Amino acid sequence: MAEVVLRDVVKTYGALPVVHAINLDIAHGEFVVLVGPSGCGKSTTLRMIAGLEDISGGEVRIGDRMVNDLPPRDRNISMVFQNYALYPHMTVRENLGFSLHIAKRSKPEIAKAVAEAADILSLTPLLDRKPGQLSGGQRQRVAMGRAIVRHPDVFLFDEPLSNLDAKLRTQMRVEIKRLHQKVGTTIIYVTHDQVEAMTLADRIVIMRDGHIVQIGTPLEVFERPVNSFVATFIGSPPMNLMPATVTGGALRLADGTALPLPPGLSAHEGQAVQFGVRADNIMPEGHSLPPTAHMAHVDMPVTLTEPLGTETLLFGTLAGTEVQAKMLNPRPVRTGEVLRFGIALDKCHLFDAETGASLRV
Amino acid sequence: MDQGRTHRIRRRLLKGGHFLGLFLAMSIICLPGLWVVLNSFRPTVEIMAKPPVWIPTELNLDHYRAMFGGVGEGGVPVLTYFWNSMIISLTSTAIALLVGMAGGYAFARHRIPGKAAIFVGLMVTRAVPGVALSLPLFILFGRIGIIDTHFGMILVYVALNVPFTIWLIDGFFRQVPKELAEAAEIDGCTRWQAFWKVEFPVARAGIASAGIFAFLTSWNEYALASQLTRSLNSKTMPVGLMDFTSQFTLNWGGMCALAVLMIIPALVLTFLVQKHLIAGLTFGGVKG
């Protein structure tokens, strides 16, 4: 186990910068997820930690060593790739034992380590198969097994679940979390799927265009997004954003609807803002939130419904913007039906219209 | 019901048609080869008979016996030719494969500006007919004194084969995901080990097929060899075939017997490597 530290790490391809001086401290045994849209530099960052990409500037430390110029094999890390990268000419057993074989460990030692890893991941019956004879989920487990046999300081996962179908993905997510609980090794995990990020991470690092936008626990980034990008990226369905202006101490939406200014937010008179509310905080009356002191009400026609069983997603238009709301204990709703919605203002967000920065104090 | 039957009949007819078509095509392709094998066992009279004798009445090993016999009895130094062919073909194949692997790997893994143009250039070198090269090569080799040497022939065949081996091997390495080497490096391999322990075995089937290709090219090549080899020093088997021609006669039987001896190693090699050529070995290591 070891901590991983990134200091002003920069990556440029020629003149094109893809990672801009990022700083990140990852503690012993922590599960950190790098998340962001494609092209945000998250995979590049991971590959720099792995040693598969040169570091253009700054410093990467694993444990107490500066590893900038160490080749991957000297960093004591393991990595699970998006396409698994199993060695197709070797059996599962040989795949698992390959790193130990390269390290010239003794045969019984290798056999023991392989058996142990196979046991943890229930791979024992598959040990003599070749990767070509395995299903996607099994390959995924072999890739993880190959990573754990070496007892590395750090595990790196590069979008390991994106080639699996939805059901298997949920299963493997649980397995990865369980694995982390069992071995307790530091994990750095890259994904573009915010659900994976939320469910797995101790801390989430949200990246965009080569910058770190926010670092925090899943609940922190969900409840207190630093800007409108994080607000819409984290959480499903994404947060509703509506253009508004602050006038006369109230919030005026594009169509003139006035709402009281949500508490705990700082906005000056006349400021153009974006009003953010999650579907969980805008609900039709009678299927609604526990009443709070900061409640506002709007009437909105329903344009589309998505029944999900325990809840139904309602699409409507509020002040010219499409809005998604949630209906708990749902009843059938007709398209075009006008419902009265309650908005929990104390759970709402305001973002500067220009910079997107959160106006929460 | 009725529709099902007509469908079935049509499918059977189609299958039969395919079979017939393939049989005809294969007969046309294989017949000359089989005729060569057959003729090598038949007396000269029967070979030359007009109208041709399709069903042999007598088969014997006379031509083989004569070929391995003394010079006066129509013998040729088969073993020397065979040896020359082997040395030249194997060495040039090995070199062409090494160069091809280095070049193909580099092309597959690195972004090389003008790669497409370089590839076209490589292919263009193969568009020049061998005979057109033979005179300039003859003069050149004459000047530096490597006519009628193994070295000279190996040089020519390496030059002939390298463009193709690079081109083929590039294609095979490009099918090997680069993550395999990266995984190997993370697993503790040096760059060199990652290549030999992972990427090379995975691309082995492709490299083997490039090897067969290069070997057969050198083994069968005649146009250049006929100019650049003069004596027992370096004459290869295809050139040796010409020993059976004299001013007024052609010893067809002997020629066929030597041709059969030429075919055997190529056939054996192909069968040996065939195992590696079976596709599917390469895949399955990635994705689902």
Image (cartoon, helix red, strand yellow):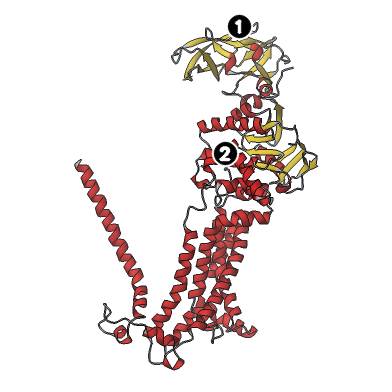
Residue B94: where, in percent of width, then height?
A: 58, 69
Residue A263: where, in percent of width, then height?
A: 70, 11
Is any part of residue A213 visible from this angle?
A: yes
Q: Residue at x 67, y 34 (%)?
A: A183
**Number of marks:** 2
Count neighbours of disc 2 (C-alpha within 10 A) and say few if under 14, some if 14 to 19, many if 20 or more.
Answer: many
2 vs 1, front mark? 2
- The residue pinned by badge 2 equals A141
Between A52 and B198, which is closer to the camera in this rendering? B198
The quarter of the picture where residue B113 lies is bottom right
Name the quarter where the N terminus of chain A is drawn.
top right
The chain containing the residue under callout 2 comes to A
The quarter of the picture where residue A176 lies is top right
The chain containing the residue under callout 1 comes to A
Q: Label for residue B38?
A: none
Count neighbours of disc 1 (C-alpha within 10 A) and say few if under 14, some if 14 to 19, many if 20 or more.
Answer: few
Residue B106: where, in percent of width, then height?
A: 63, 58
In this view, A335 is above or below B180:
above
Residue A37: where, in percent of width, then height?
A: 62, 34
- The residue pinned by badge 1 equals A291
Q: Residue at x 69, y 53 (%)?
A: B190
Q: In this rendering, do the residues under marks 2 and 1 share a single chain?
A: yes
